[in-house]
Image: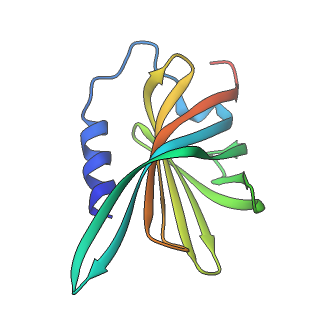
Amino acid sequence: MLIWLATAIALSGQDRSPGQHALSSIKRLKCSFRTSTAGDWQNGEPQVRVTERRNALGFTIADIDSADGIATMTRAEGASSVSVQLSGSNLYFLDVRARGAALTTVFSQESQPGRLKAVHTQTEPNLAQYYGDCEILEATPR
């Protein structure tokens, strides 16, 4: 969680591009994460491994309604309803599962045109954090 917090603080302090997207207008995203960190404790000390993934972790988030706080996340395992929170310049998706939780943060900064920086953190089956971006597939006109 400390890695996520440091990443969120660092990214949220960056300058916004003039073409930033109004996060509240986004209705569908396709997210892809190629870099990950995995955490574990050995002899009571936290250990972190950084990995470049050959096959990206990916999922879509659809039917995003930040006003009502709901969306649908579709992963390889299937679709689930998730909670949505728009706060400042970040859009958060919380997926509480039977064996843990996952939090996806989408930042307003573009990694490249039409793609927003994103971080995905999960607590099951292992503690891990993924770094990548989300392509905007659908947004309401501003």
Q: Residue at horizontal 30%, vertical 37%?
A: 11
For the view shown, which residue lies furthest in the top direction? Answer: 18
- Measured as percent of width and height from the top left, residue 138 is found at 72, 27
Q: Quadrant of residue 43?
A: bottom left
Residue lying farthest to the front in this orientation: 54
Note whether residue 106 is visible.
Answer: no
Q: Is residue 129 visible?
A: yes
Quarter of the image with the N terminus in it: bottom left
In the image shown, does 108 or 35 lie closer to the viewer? 35
In the picture, which quadrant includes the C terminus? top right
Q: Residue at x 26, y 70 (%)?
A: 47
Residue 105 location in percent, x, y?
47, 48
Is residue 41 toward the left or the right of residue 45 in the image?
A: right
Looking at this view, name the residue that lies furthest to the right. Answer: 78
Q: Is residue 40 left or right of residue 116?
A: left
Instruction: Give the image location of residue 120, x and y in percent.
Output: 49, 52
Does residue 45 lie above or below 136 as drawn? below
Residue drawn at x 37%, y 17% as measured from the top left: 17
Left or right of 94? Residue 80 is right
Hey, which quadrant is residue 62 in on the image?
top right
Residue ID at (45%, 24%): 110
User: Left or right: 114 with respect to 11?
Assistant: right
| Camera-nearest residue between 11 and 35 | 35
Above or below, comparing residue 130 to residue 116 in the picture: below
